[in-house]
């Protein structure tokens, strides 16, 4: 893999400029400090525990800091989850050695904040305070909003390289902590070794460990080209539809909300064509 450049980092001028310059052209960008006024930037472990501590949640549990850890022996281990209260989860990611704290990750896979389907809106009332303190940005077209997820972790988590298989653009609001990001355009498809359903049902995920690529097993990855960037509290990262991404969570307490929305036009790129082929084969996303 080679780093071809930095994700552009700009001060937001207007909604119209964002949509024309970046969304329409499917170009990633970090909108520096665009969410700097969100009350969520003042969250602490104590305030989150006070507000949400009694909420029952499920969260990811890995044998390592990788999520999923595709080196695990079984699908059950790769996609393992545990249950508890949000306060108990916060305790897991706050205490102990960093390697232990990085084994746990809360995402909307287990519990969405909001979603809209067929004109109907569902809000998880228990998690509604997250949206109160990190409201949907005006950059997101209200009539195209699809899902809002929250993400929480301690330090050291690595999210494995993947693309979002919901066919949406993503605006990622960094609220607490910092994250290092790698982004790969859909045109890099032939180099990133995505899983075939005969190998693993997570067909939107790469088999490559981006921290320690194996050139024998994944020889094409050395030709892959990525953009990199670092997110600070108050930044918004625009991830265009089908861009592959992997994050390293750097803060002691990391939090972000993701706002997904459907593009206003049909998308035809290598990932979209792959998705159609997989659907024709009867493969269903994990």
Image (cartoon, rainbow, N blue to C red):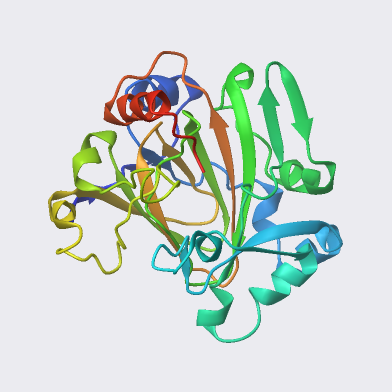
Q: For residue 24, which quarter of the picture?
A: top left
Residue 281, percent from left and from top: 38, 28
Determine whether, in the image, residue 234 is placed left or right of residue 88: left
Residue in the image at 77% along x and 71% along y: 88
- Residue furthest toward the top? 265
Image location (x, y in percent) of residue 216: 14, 64
**Is 8 situated above or below 175?**
above
Name the residue at 64% across, 38% down: 148
127 shown above or below 26: below
Q: Position of residue 83 (x, y in %)?
A: 74, 63
Q: Residue at x 28, y 35 (%)?
A: 186
Look at the image and tell me in which quarter the N terminus lies.
bottom left
Rendering coords of residue 21 (x, y %)? 35, 24
- Residue 104: image quadrant is bottom right
Q: On screen, 256 above or below 26? A: below
Taking the image as shown, residue 67 lies to the left or right of residue 118, namely left
Number of marks in the rendered image:
0
Q: Nearer the viewer, residue 27 or 54?
A: 54
* Residue located 36% across and 46% down the image: 198
Left or right, 233 with respect to 279, comes to right
**Residue at the farthest bottom position:** 97
Q: Between residue 5 and residue 162, name the one nearer to us.
A: 162
Horizontal arrangement in the rendering, residue 204 relative to residue 216 (left or right):
right
Q: Quadrant of residue 46?
A: bottom right
The residue closer to the viewer here, 273 or 259, is 273
271 lies above or below 229? above
């Amino acid at each position: 893999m080679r780093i071809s450049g930095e994700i552009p980092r700009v001060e937001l001028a207007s909604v119209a400029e964002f949509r024309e310059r970046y969304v329409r052209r499917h170009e990633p960008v970090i909108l520096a400090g665009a969410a700097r006024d969100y009350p969520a930037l003042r969250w602490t472990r104590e305030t989150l525990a006070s507000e949400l501590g009694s909420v029952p949640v499920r969260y990811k549990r890995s044998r390592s800091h990788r999520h999923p850890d595709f080196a695990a022996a079984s699908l059950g281990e790769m996609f393992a989850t545990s249950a508890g209260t949000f306060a108990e989860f916060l305790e897991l990611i706050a205490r102990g050695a960093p390697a232990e704290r990085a084994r746990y990750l809360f995402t909307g896979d287990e519990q969405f904040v909001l979603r809209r389907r067929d004109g109907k809106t569902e809000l998880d009332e228990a998690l509604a305070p997250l949206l109160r303190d990190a409201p949907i940005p005006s950059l997101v077209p209200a009539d195209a909003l699809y899902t809002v997820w929250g993400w929480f972790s301690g330090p050291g988590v690595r999210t494995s390289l993947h693309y979002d298989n919901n066919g949406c653009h993503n605006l990622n609001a960094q609220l607490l902590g910092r994250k290092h990001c790698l982004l790969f355009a859909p045109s890099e498809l032939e180099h990133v070794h995505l899983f075939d359903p005969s190998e693993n049902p997570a067909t939107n995920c790469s088999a490559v460990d981006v921290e320690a690529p194996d050139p024998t097993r994944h020889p094409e990855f050395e030709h892959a080209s990525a953009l990199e960037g670092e997110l600070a509290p108050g930044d918004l990262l625009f991830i265009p539809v089908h861009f592959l991404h992997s994050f390293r969570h750097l803060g002691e307490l990391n939090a972000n909300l993701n706002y997904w929305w459907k593009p206003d036009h049909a998308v035809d790129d290598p990932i979209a064509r792959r998705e159609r082929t997989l659907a024709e084969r009867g493969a269903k996303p994990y």
